[in-house]
Each structure stands twice: as structure tokens, then as C-alpha cells.
Image (spheres, rainbow, N blue to C red):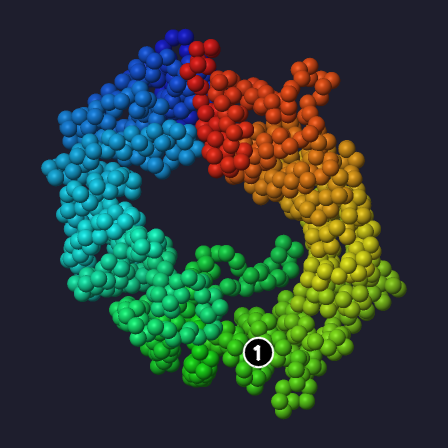
Amino acid sequence: MAAEKLRDLSQPIDVSLLDATVAAFYGTGSKEERAAADHILRDLQNNPDMWLQVVHILSSTQSLNTKFFALQVLEGVIKYRWNALPVEQRDGMKNYISEVIVKLSSDEASLRRERLYISKLNIILVQILKHEWPARWRSFIPDLVAAAKTSETICENCMAILKLLSEEVFDFSRGEMTQQKIKELKQSLNSEFQLIHELCLYVLSVSHRTELIRATLATLHAFLSWIPLGYIFESTLLEILLKFFPMPSYRNLTLQCLTEVAALNFGDFYNEQYVKMYTIFMGQLQSVLPVNTNIPEAYANGSNEEQAFIQNLALFFTSFFKASFFTLCLRHENIYFESHIRVLESSQENISALLLGLEYLINISYVDDTEVFKVCLDYWNSLVLELFEAAHHNLDNPAMTANLMGLQMPLLSGMNDGLGAQLMQRRQLYSGPMSKLRLLMISRMAKPEEVLIVEDENGNIVRETMKDNDVLVQYKIMRETLIYLSHLDHDDTEKQMLKKLSNQLNGEDWSWNNLNTLCWAIGSISGSMVEEQENRFLVMVIRDLLNLCEITKGKDNKAVIASNIMYVVGQYPRFLRAHWKFLKTVVNKLFEFMHETHPGVQDMACDTFLKIVQKCKRKFVVVQVGENEPFVSELLTTLPTTIADLEPHQIHTFYESVGQMIQAEPDPQKRDEYLQRLMELPNQRWNEIIGQARQSVDYLKDQDVIRAVLNILQTNTSAASSLGTYFLPQITLIFLDMLNVYRMYSELISTSIAQGGPYASRTSIVKLLRSVKRETLKLIETFLDKAEDQPHIGKQFVPPMMDPVLGDYARNVPDARESEVLSLFATIINKYKGAMIEDVPRIFEAAFQCTLEMITKNFEDYPEHRLKFFSLLRAIATHCFAALIRLSSEQLKLVMDSIIWAFRHTERNIAETGLNLLLAMLKNFQNSEFANQFYRTYYLTIEQEIFAVLTDTFHKPGFKLHVLVLQHLFCMVAMLSEPLWDASTVPVSYPNNVEFVREYTIKLLSTSFPNMTSAEVTQFVSGLFDSTNDLPTFKNHIRDFLVQSKEFSAQVAEGL
């Protein structure tokens, strides 16, 4: 292939051939051509002399892709080898890049034509600046400003360079430059900002060129968050920005600049300027976007630019209202933080502008865009919290948790004094916006936690609770906001909700979505009113919802209304607990719904039943007035009829609910009787199956029987999750038979996999059998986890499991081993702690080596086993450390090797589990009598392995934990009383361990990073020892080293 000639860099490279190779790489040629081109280009990129050809390539080629390839080569050299280059080569490249940029940006046509190329050249220049400026290129800023004044197009590009520079230094510098270098660059930018400031003001005052003004505004935006405040408030900058705001071309950029200014936090020195800026801005905004504009509609129909304007407007208002300044009270030596909003409250004229701004923000909050709404919601939440705290005289206790969630607030103690009057006045001031905000929250209420019915990988229907998704987070913030709003004015909250409900009744607002959001909002404020008001309010709500259900036609509509009634009722347990007849009616209604086959109704009924029982469980186990027996007894009598139409997963929820009731019964005799009645149906079926199996074991192999066994076990697990310790009589009844079924199914699985190979594990029968095994383990784990810490329970259940569960795990082929065995024994050790020490060797023998062999072949297979294996190991290290000490040296080595393997893993959660486990092990050994022995064996290995993962690029997320391990090692070394080195292999004698580790670390790092000088490495290692007791300094020291370790320094270059 002709392109092979490119590898010879002893003469100027053939640019046309390079163009063809780059074109082949990006082109549509064959796969082989692309692969060959890729191979050659990679080799060229890795050749240390290739960068010397860059100027020749850039001067000769017309291909943009080839230019980018050449600049990529150059960028690598600048990043990592710049300081190692001779001065004349550095100056030559610096001057060449500067000249090309000036030449290309000196006229309009080439600036537009070569836009991408110039942008890349700007990046290269800024990369050079990070090394050269200020020490070796002191005149850079004056040179740039002088060049900018020669032509408007050059000036436009200079603005782009300044913006890049600011971003590199202030936004993206961490991990790219050392702390010292970042500090130096920030100081240089600050000290030379006057020239930049003058240039920006000059351009904005004189230029009429749209692109130049836009570039200048974009540059200013990058600078405004850090420049000295005098440049903003003691110059004409704000005046100029406000002049540009009404102009459509500059509106968004100007608004971004004003938002940066609005968000600044500092003393009250510039309050006057802030108020002036805000009032002028509000005057201009009314002509740009009249206050009566339908903003949600305008947003929906607007262009990208117009939508961005609404987004920026939301950011401006929230930043301005939220930003706080501090005032110092010298007499009490206190610092108070107050927001800009308090300054606007000081005069009637400003109050009008403030209320107008809040009006705009409420209108923007209706925009159908999640991100815009999040920005607004975040501010509304902080505002109502501030109003609430101020109104309740409780600044020392901002959480107000006890009062907030259901207890009515006391009246203000000092209402007649001046402060009380001020607070009332302030409350009055915000009553209008707060009333509109209540309507907004009610109209846009997010969906609460949701239970989804899903099918697992084995085809079983299971319930899953949605957690931590965006909607749930939003619901929690909105709920908190609405609770505060309700406390600020209960009557208005009630009025708004009942009005929205009457609009549903008269059909004016009727829709599923409107009803859902309203009922979620009504449910969310439970406990925020006094009990009497809440009772009255809830009765009216339920009356209206029942009327709505009666007058609305269509089964779908009725189902939606019914589910909302049940949701609201389930959210008010205080009302239910106080009104037994109503509670009983609701539960009986839910039992009716359990026979309703309309999609979703049965799930809703079962979930609501569980929620109500969790909050009112004691009401069901006492005999209520006018009744002969507790409700739970009545329910158990009719249980077969109640659950007759439910699906298996719904029956499991039902059993969990009844388990909650039984758990609340204080009389042990009654409790056991209820449990026996609850489990009558599944036990009857279980006894039938076991009876048949005793006559013929083949009966257990029938798929319908396997499904029945699975369902019985799942029912038991549901009851066990509610009953905990009180489930003991039931699990004792089935435990041994269950273990026999487990063992038999396990043998069936192993035989199928041994005969059919790995594909056998995917057959439906094997999947079903494994489901039974997993459910058995889950049932035992649930019971032991929920049961109170009673050692006799552990002694009763753990020994019989050793062979059927642990022994079976060891005997099985890898594909037939259940990872749940590992999590079960982790749960047992976490529960019974030191009592399990004697059993650890048995667990170790059965589960350790065979699992390690499965998971260490590669980083992909058996993901479930990986995490659960390390959870088990962590449980042993935490609670049964004495058992680890007793292991043989070969077994302990196996443990340490597995931990090292874990933190080398490229999957973050496994690597972090390994690192946390390592830290736990190190701390345990530190406090043990075997500290010297352990550290002598493993200290150097751990240090070497941690430095290996710290300095590669695959383990960045573990940085904090790597630092903690290293800090521990460097602290520990001085505490050891025996030498870490082996006198028989190390000829030199060291005065102490610190000196030995210092020399070892210097050698280790010097060998690993030949690009660093011995002085740099020695300085780094000394710095580690000096900062062991100061974690932030220690961490920054390592962060600087990671930057330096990638670069060649000048002294190394001289020795090359």
C-alpha cells in the first residue's frame, strides 16, 4: 500500500498521500481500507517526531479533516510534552499558530469560511497559553488587545479566545492543571482584566457589527462570575447591557449576562445598583413581553430562540430573587444573610416591580417544559420555606419537622410588637402571589410514588416500587412546597382545592389528568391542617368525589374516579383512625373492588389496602364499639371469598397487609391463631403436595406443581415480611420439607445443565425450578432479616441449612449456583454478627474458592455473584474479623487477592465495594495484634496496586477511596514496630519504616513515570508524608501529581 511511505518521517511527509489516507478513514470505502488507514494514522499519531511535520501539513493541505488530524497530533504534544521541547521549537510553534489565526481572522470571508478550523486553532493556542502564560509570554493579554483593535473580525476571534481561556481556567481546570498553576492563571487574569474590560466596553459602545457584539457578550458572560465587582457596578457595563436587552439579536446573550450579575452573592454595598438594574429591566421586559401574554402558549409555538428567552428569563428571576447578600451586625458579631428580594420590599415602588416579577415567574411556571419547571419549582420551594420560617418565629429550627407534619402551629407569640406587625405586613404582601402559587402547585402536581406490575426474567409477575426517578423527586419537592403554602394560609388552600373540585363536578375542568393532579395535591397536604378543619375538608372532598363518580358515565371514567377516592382516603390515616365506621366502610369497599376485573382496579385496591393497614393496623385487632369480634378475625373467616378473583401477585400483597394487622395483636395466643388461620389455604395445598411427593417424588417435577410450590413460597415471603419474628410458628412448620424440595430441585437443575450444557439453563423448566430455589432463599432471608435479633432463631435455622444450601452451592456446576445463597449468608452474618464466627470456615470452604473461580475469569460473567460475593466478604470482615485472622496464610492471600481483583474491576460498583472492603480490612488489622505480620506481607502490594489504579484512566470514579487507602498506608507506616523489609533480600538497612517506604515509593513512581524528574517524584513523596493528617491537602497533592505524571518536564528532555 502506497500509504506505507507515510511512516518514513526522515523527510517532509507526502501531504497528498496523507490527504488520501485521511479521506479513506472518513470515507465510504471498504472496511479493510478504513482499517488500514486507521492503523497508519494511529502509528503516525504515536510517533514522537510526527509533530515536526504539522506546520508543513497545515501549510500544504486543503482538506479540513487532514488539518484536524495534524492539530490533534500537535494537541497531544502540547498537553504532555510541551515543557520538554527546546525553547526555539516552542516559540516557533507559538508564533506560527498566532500568525495563522490572525491571517484567517483578518477578513470577513475567511473568518466565516474557515470557522471550524479557526475554532480548533483557538483551542490549540489556549492549550499553549496554559504552559507559556504568564511566565514565558507576559505580553499575551496586551498583544491580544492590541491585535483586536486592528480589525473587527480579528476582534471577534480575540473574544472567542478570551472566552475559551476563562472557561479553561475557571471551569475545566480541575484535573488538567496543578493547583499552583490554576492559582497563577487566575491571578494573572484578574490582574490584567482591566485591559479586557476596556476592550469589551469599547466594542459594545462603538461597534455596529452584530457578530462582534454577540461574541463580546458571550465572552463577558464567561467572565462575569469571577471578575472584581468594581468592573460591574462602578462602570457603565450594566447600563450598556440594559441598552442591548430590547434588541432581538442580543436579547438572550444580554439576559444571560444579567443573570450572572443577578446571581452574585456579596455584601449590601451595591444594593442601589441592583434595584436600579432590576427596575429598568422590568420596564423593558413589559414592552418585550407584555405581562398579559399567555407565556405557556407563546413558548409552545415559539422558535428555538424565543423558547431560550423564556428559559433564560426563568433563570434571571430565580437567580435574582434567590441571591443573598450578608450584613454584619457588629454589636452582636453576627452575620445575617438576606436575599435581594428583601431590598425590593423596602419601598412601594420597588414592591410593584417585585410583584410583577413574581407574576411573570408564576406564568413561566405553567410552561410545559420539565427543565423550566424544575428551575421555577426550586425557587418557589425556597421562597415558601423562608416565608414559613419567618412567620413562625422559628429561625433556630428551620426544619420544623415535628410541627410541620401534622401539628398545628402556635400563634405568633409577639404579634402585638413591632416584629409581629412587620411579619403580618410581609405575609400580606405575598398573599396574592402565594394564592396563585397554590393554584399552580395543585394544577401541576407530580405523580406520587408508583407501584408497577412487571414481569421478571422468569415470567413471574412481580410488584416493583419506582424509586428515585425524576417525577418522584419532583413530587417530594412539590409536596413540601404545598405543605408550607397550606400552613401559610389553610383557608385559601382549602378554597382553591374545593373550587377545582367543583369545576370537575360541573364539567368545566373535567379530565383524567386534571382530576389526578388535584387528588395527588389533596393527598399531599395530609396533616397540615388542624384536625377539625382537616376532617371537615376531607368529608367535603369525599362527598364531591362520590357525587362525581355517580354522575359520570363510562366504566373507564368511574375506575379513574374510584382509584382517586381510594388514593385520597389512604393519605389521611389520622381521619381513618378517628372514624372506625368510615374506615371499615372504606376497607369493605376495597374488598368489593378486588372482584372488579376492570384493568388496574384490583391492583389499586390491594395497594390501597396495604397502605391503610400500615397506618391503621391497631384498629383492626381490637373489638370496636358495637361489634362482636376484631375486624381481623372477621376478615380471616371470609378470606377465601375475598381473594377468589385476585391474581397471585395481588394475593401476595393481600397477605402482606393481613400480616401487618396480625403483627399489631399484642396477645401471643391470638396472634398465633390468626397466623394459623391466615396460612390455612397455602398450608393445605403445601401438605397435599408434600404428601403426594412422599408417595412419588416425580410428582414434584410437574410444571403446574412447581408453579404451585413457587406461589406458596411467595405467599409465605409476603407474610414473613410483615410479621418478622411472629412468623416463627409458620416457617418452623414448612422449613425442613422446604429444604428437601430445595435439594431435590437443585439436583434436577444440575443434572439438566450437566447434560444439556449452558443452554439448558435457559429452558423454561430450569428457569421455573431456579425460581423456586431463589424464592426459598428469599423467604429464609426475609424471615431472618425481619426477625428480632434472637440468637435461638439463628441456632434453630442456620445449622440445618449448611448442607442443603451451602453444601449444595459448592457441589453445583457454576451455572446452577444461586447468587442468593451469598446474600442470604451475608444477611445471616450481618444479623447474628460474632455468633457466626464458628461457622465462617464452613462458609469460606463452601462458597469462597468456587465463587472466585467463577468471577475472576473475566470482568463480565456472573454479575450478580460478583456483588453478592463481596457483600458477604464485607459482612465477614466487619462482624467476624476474628475468623479471618484464623484463616491459613493461603486462604488469607486468597481473600486479599480477591479484594485487589475487585478494585481493579472496571465496573464502578464492584471497584467501590472492593475499596470499601479494603479500608475495612486495613482498619481491622491496624487494631489487631497481627498488624505487623499483615502489613509486612501486604503493605507494598497494596500500595503498588492502588497507585496502578489511581494513575490509569479506567478507575477515575474511585479517586476519593484511592486517596483514603493511601492516606491510611502513609499514616500507618510510622506506627508499625517491625521492619517492612526482608533483611535477607534487602541488603541496605533502613533507620525506620518511613525511610524504607519513602525510598520504595520513589523507586516505584520513577520506574512507572520516566517522564518525571527524580526531584519531582521525591518532592511528591515527601509531600505525601507531610500531609498525611490533612486530607484536603493530601488529596490535592495527589491530584497535582496525576497532572504532572502525564507531562514531560524540561529536565527529563535534556537527559533524553
Residue 897 at x, y = what percent? Answer: 69, 34
Q: What is the quadrant of residue 188 in the picture? A: top left
| Image point (72%, 66%), residue name | 725
Position above or below: 946 against 527: above
Q: How many numbered discs sit on the rendered protein?
A: 1
Where's residue 541, x and y in %?
43, 80
Instruction: Kindly state the secondary structure of the residue where label 1 is placed.
Output: helix
Label 1: few (<14), some or many (≥20) within 10 Å?
many
Q: Amino acid at mark 1?
A: Leu
Measured as percent of width and height from the top left, residue 757 is found at 74, 43
Image vertical order of residue 383 relative to residue 923, above or below: below
Q: Residue at x 52, y 25 (%)?
A: 1022
- Seen in the image, is 817 located left or right of residue 205? right
Residue 1004: x percent and y percent?
58, 22
Residue 691 versus residue 621: which sits nearer the camera? Answer: 621
1000 or 756, which is in the foreground? 1000
Q: Kindly identify the residue that appears in the image at 59 percent across and 33 percent down.
A: 971
**Residue 998 figure quarter:** top right
Residue hosting label 1: 590
Of 529 and 207, which appears nearest the observer? Answer: 529
Q: Residue sitting at 61 percent across and 42 percent down?
A: 916
The answer to whether residue 798 is visible is: yes
